[in-house]
Amino acid sequence: GLRIGIDPTVFTVKDSNDLSEKLKEYSAQLISLKDNLIDIQWATSRPARPHHPIKILDLKYAGQSTSQKLDNIRDRLKSLSNSRQKLIGIVVSALDEIAWCLNLRGSDIVYNPVFFSYLWIDVQDHVILFVTEEQLNPTLNKYLAENGVQTRPYDSIWAYLHELNDRKLNFSSPSAVPYSKVLISPSTSLAIENHLGGESNTVHLRSPLQDRKAIKNAT
């Protein structure tokens, strides 16, 4: 059959699944490419990704602390677990959700108070912000540490997801909690799911951060 190559970093999980279903009518399938051919043509002439300073949003404007938000998200993740699957964490790629959750603001995208990043939250107490190191400063590092948030370089997200998959996170271990999976939003890039080991290791659900962000507090 036909094989159609795509860059999984620019296709969402939902879009790739929808397209795959359509292509079945033509005995065709999508193949995730390791390298984007256009990126190869860019070589070293491609402009750098913006990485402007990140600012802390004062609690009097946010209305709720980062630690409170993380506790609420973990409670939601635990409530979504059942006898068939146990959610062990969530990968967040929506920039507005990350900015909201951490009470941070940026200017990497014109007219949008966000910054390029990824966020990992597990159901215990492990939180990692993947962000360009130049955007951090001592005050911001102290603030994140006080809220239990570690930082790692932006591009290290892929190695970390591979690490999760390599350890299997009890995904398929018959001697551990069965069916442990990672929650991702349908709007998450296919590349994230691929690095987690594929659809069998993930659950596609509306992001709990999106739901919580929609609930206005007194502030």
Image: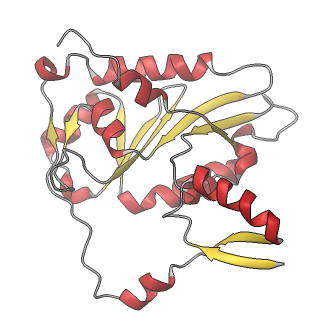
The image shows residue 50, relative to residue 53, as above or below, that is below
Q: Report the residue at 27% width, 27% height from top.
A: 146
User: Quick check: 131 left or right of 87?
Assistant: left
The percent position of residue 118, horizontal first and vertical second, equals 40, 48
User: Quick check: 203 left or right of 38?
Assistant: right
Q: Return the residue nearer the eye: 138 or 208.
A: 208
Quadrant showing the C terminus: top left
Q: Return the residue nearer the eye: 176 or 66.
A: 66
The image shows residue 119, relative to residue 39, as above or below, that is above
The single residue placed furthest to the right in the displayed view is: 174
Q: Report the residue at 81% width, 41% height from top.
A: 172
The image shows residue 169, relative to residue 212, as above or below, that is below
The percent position of residue 25, horizontal first and vertical second, equals 81, 65
Q: How is the image coloured?
A: secondary structure
Q: How many marks?
A: 0
The percent position of residue 19, horizontal first and vertical second, equals 66, 60
The percent position of residue 155, horizontal first and vertical second, equals 41, 62
The single residue placed furthest to the top in the displayed view is: 218
Q: Quadrant of residue 4?
A: bottom right
Q: Report the residue at 50% width, 85% height from top.
A: 37
Q: Report the residue at 80% width, 64% height from top.
A: 24
Q: Quadrant of residue 20?
A: bottom right
Quadrant showing the N terminus: bottom right
